[in-house]
Image (cartoon, helix red, strand yellow):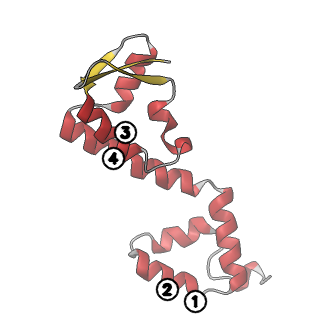
Amino acid sequence: MKKVKDMVFKDFSEFWSYTKLLNNYQRDILFSKLSSDEQKEIGKSYHDGYWEDLFMRNKIDDVVDGIEKDFGINLINLRIKILQGKSHYMKKSEWKFISDILAQYSYRHIKYLVDGISVEDVDDTAVCLVKS
């Protein structure tokens, strides 16, 4: 492996600080021009530093903000109320839309929104979210 002084970036944090304003294509080109040792070191730093979790949380938070804007439902506040024992009725179509969006992400990244909640069918048009 190269000495640290021979590396362009010491870790993923430094790589990101210099490349975050680039688009993915530009960032990928730059990354591909680094030595394989440096690419491995940056990749290791990315995983060891839980950067994926941070990026996914930010992405999902944007989705949560969109749901609140479009439906008037704050999923975080809703989960808090449900975990306190208050049930919540909603249109089945809205819940399907929300759950379809969240299904795109791994449970580990969305559990702060859905852990401890069960969904019960009320009828053809409504569901009830309850504490599980």
Marks 1 and 3, how far apart at CA: 40 Å
Q: Are marks 3 and 4 in contact (CB under 8 Å)?
A: no
Which secondary structure lies at badge 1? Answer: loop
Which secondary structure lies at badge 3? Answer: helix
Residue at image position (58%, 64%) is: 13
Tag nearer the camera, 3 or 4: 3
Q: Are marks 1 and 4 in contact (CB under 8 Å)?
A: no
Tag nearer the camera, 1 or 3: 3
Marks 3 and 4, how far apart at CA: 12 Å
Q: Label 3, on which residue?
A: 99
Residue 29 numbered tag = 2
* Amino acid type for the residue under numbered disc 2: Ile
Which secondary structure lies at badge 4? Answer: helix
Number of residues whose C-alpha sits closer than 10 Å to that of mark 1, classed few (under 14), some (14–19) or many (20 or more): few
Residue 33 numbered tag = 1
Q: Are marks 2 and 1 in contact (CB under 8 Å)?
A: yes
Residue 94 horizontal/vertical position (percent)? 25, 34
Chain-order first, disc 2 or disc 4: 2
Residue 63 numbered tag = 4
Residue 107 horizontal/vertical position (percent)? 53, 42
Residue 43 horizontal/vertical position (percent)? 65, 69
* Amino acid type for the residue under numbered disc 3: Ser
